[in-house]
Amino acid sequence: MRDHTLRVRAGTTGDVDAAQSLMGSARRWLHEQSIDQWQDRVPDSTFEKDAERGHFFVVERHGAVIAMVTVADEDDETWPADDVPASYVHRLAVDSSHRGDNLGGRLLSWVEVRAQEAGKQVVRLDCAADNPGLRRFYEARGFSHVGDSSVSDPTGARSLKISLYEKRLDA
């Protein structure tokens, strides 16, 4: 029987290798599914900056990082500017050995509680427009599709079509 207690901690620059491992595993799985999401490696410096800003979080079990998420108070690269207090989710990844444990859903619930405690009205996130499984995952958790957009890959070499989602939080 697995321990289902969710222990989230602030990620550090020492967690970058673990984050890259999670992303690499997800990248390979998504590629096998012909989904163009996370196919471009996120630079270590992005994780380092997220950790330094307090935006990077990890779930650790038995000393190993098994999931991660980045949560920020703004995302002007992806979302149009507005005055709605929001938390923005990126790079939510779960180790493949924990697929089916609802760890991703539980981590999203943690984000929602944290956002609500910080006075946010919505949680926003995005995913590849051609990722129907992830889109269903978000919709099943109460996120609404609010539109599509395009963003550049981390190198700026190509454009990626994304779907934008948000979930309104109870006051």
Image (tube, rainbow, N blue to C red):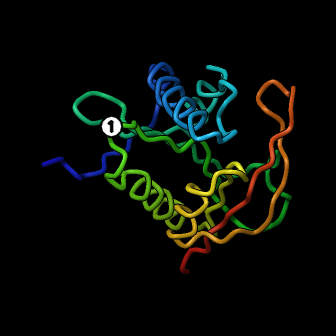
Up-down: is 170 above or below 80? below
Report the residue that reaches farthest toward the left. 1
Tell me if residue 56 comes above or below residue 2 in the rendering. above
Circle 1 residue: 97
Left or right: 123, with 147 as reference point: left
Of 3 and 163, nearer the camera is 163
Q: Going 31% across and 52% down the picture, which residue do you hit? A: 101
Residue shown at 57% from the left, 31% from the top = 27
Seen at 33% across and 42% down, the residue is: 98
Q: Nearer the viewer, residue 156 or 6?
A: 156
Where is residue 151 drawn, in percent x and y? 83, 43
Image coords of residue 17 (percent x, y): 48, 19
Number of numbered markers: 1
Rendered view: 15 above or below 169: above
Percent position (x, y) of residue 117? Answer: 49, 65
Q: Give coordinates of residue 66: x percent, y percent.
A: 36, 36
Vertical arrangement, residue 112 with respect to residue 24, above or below: below
